[in-house]
Amino acid sequence: MTTFARRTLRAVLAGGLTAAALVWPAGTPAGAAAAATVSVDFTKPIRTISAVDYGVGITGYGEGSYITNDAKHRDHLRRLGVGRMRIELHYQTPGDHDSPIVCGGYKCATEVSGDAWITAIRDLGAEPVVILQVDGRQTAEVNRDDAVALYRHFAASGKPVQRFILGNELNCACTPDKPEMPATEYSRRFNLIADALRAVDPAVKVGGPATAWDDHDYIRTLLRNSGDRVDFVDYHDYGNGSEPVTDEALLGDVIREYETDIAAVRALIRSELGRDLDLQIGEFNSDFDDPDGHRTLTHFNTLWGAAAVGQMLHAGASAFQYGDKNGQLGLTSTKGEGGIARSEPLPIYHGIGMYTGEGLFRPFGKTVVEARADNDELHVFASDHAKNVVLVNVGDEPLETALTLTGLTSGTAAVWQSTSDAWTPHRTGTAAISGGRATVTLPAGSATTLVIGEQGLTATYFDNADLTGKSVTRVDPTVNFDWGSSSPDPAIGPDTFSARWTGQVVADKAETYTFITTSDDGVRLWVDGRLLIDAWTDHSKRDDTAEIALTAGRHDITMEFYDSGYDAIAELRWSSPTTPRQVIPAERLVAG
């Protein structure tokens, strides 16, 4: 849905824009809230994700402000916590491997070296993904040889780049002076480059065709001609394409169409190859133009970003926002767009941040689970293995939302919200979960993340005695186990297993607490990072105790245990001047 020339020229030429008036009222009386119902089923996994499913395009734009030299911009990207960053690199003079490696985007900052870009990406904790040049202005052999030379250049540092996208938006004349390339010729060059790279390093991953939209004919040709060489399929998908879309549709039907569009591309892959490939949306944003900034420079883009990222993750794709610096399309301001100070976050940053946490709260979990809402103006996405729920109310009135949570009986949820008058996620309260139900008010035009702390401790059981290898994870309401000669789970063998419990313990008063472990065999206990009990030895059933002064409130706690044979016992108790000795109850534990 994109025209690259319009997008990049807008980025290069755009001046500071004034944001349009906010659509949503800053405050609405509680009595005006409508009702909504949400169901989340933590027992029904959809897919597994990780940090690498969140990505950003590094543009090489920024008018002197880049990830290589702007500490503020760099710090914001580090806090956003995406796992991959994509950048186009090529030799400044194609075919001349003594010429500098520079960014390859249209009118990007070629004074910054390729080494500086890759170093900066890695310093931000992300994996670099490099777009290699496939360009009809050079021969296929030049493109191939440049790709291999560029790979060898970075490999010489001892840290090779191993994930590549071949070419960019060649299904259209989208970049000034760069010709469109027929899909058959693209596939021929893809094969030449992929084979040459894998001859040097078989671990290299290559993908494409990085079309400007989900161009099925172009993708089909690549799959038919190069399918055994393609590791992942990449295409771009902007909310507002060449045809105008209303704000209402952009926040509604367009979001939901990500699900069907991604499913259609996946079906195409299966029909051509008889198997799945990884899918990534190599560029996304609400709009590629938006000259008055009424979307990209207002809270609209926070809502759109939160809903779009959730839908893409749910549908089975990775999502690369475009781009880190790009006028009003950036993650942070280039030169004060919309009155937002240079290198401070633009609205879409916070949309992504409702998942990554921005360093403020625990990120979305690693398992996407089933979640539904009964209101078309409410998008909902949820995760397990860190139970989070993201709710995006795109309507113009608040919603009193009743949640039913299958697979979770009790706990508390920290409520983090981004609202029209406060874009940065902020803690607005706590929602109690009882009987698998909770209620939360969603302001008009808001994105909300519920960070659920289950009562109990997160338990990870390992099928050996050294806390490594195959594991089973669950939440244990208490640590009060006498397994005898059996094991904690059918997937874990009896004897020679180990366990780790993590979370927080809640002290209701400031006083000195005595912690007591009962174990057979080894046990260790930390509270607030301090090792209190260290009995990591084979022994029969025994108690170990330690004291610590705690303030009222939450304190980090970790307990480790191993069984070397015969009886297996692991129990955790406490006492204080006002608390009799007891197994620490579930209501005093919060899963980590």
Image (cartoon, rainbow, N blue to C red):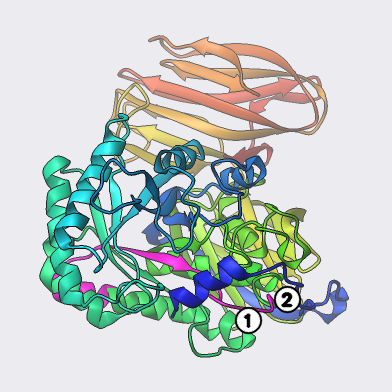
Q: Amino acid at mark 1?
A: Glu
Residue picked out by circle 2: 399
**Residue 398 — which label?**
none
Labels 2 & 1 near each other (Cβ < 8 A): yes
Q: Residue at x 73, y 71 (%)?
A: 17
The circle on residue 377 is 1
Asked whether, in this view, residue 515 is left or right of residue 125, the answer is: right
Which residue lies at the image location 65% right of the left edge and 67% below the top edge? Answer: 302
Query: What range is drawn magenta here?
Result: 266-293
Residue 557, how many percent across, how many down?
60, 28
Say above or below: 63 vs 126: below
The N terminus is located in which quarter?
Answer: bottom left
Q: Nearer the viewer, mark 2 or mark 1?
A: 1
Residue 511 lies in the magenta stretch: no
Q: Quadrant of residue 532?
A: top right
Helix, strand or loop status at disc 2: strand
As helix, strand or loop, the secondary structure at mark 1 comes to: loop
The C terminus sits in image quarter: top right
Q: CA distance from mark 2 to mark 1?
A: 10 Å
Q: Position of residue 283 (x, y in %)?
A: 44, 66
Residue 225 placement, left or right of 339: left
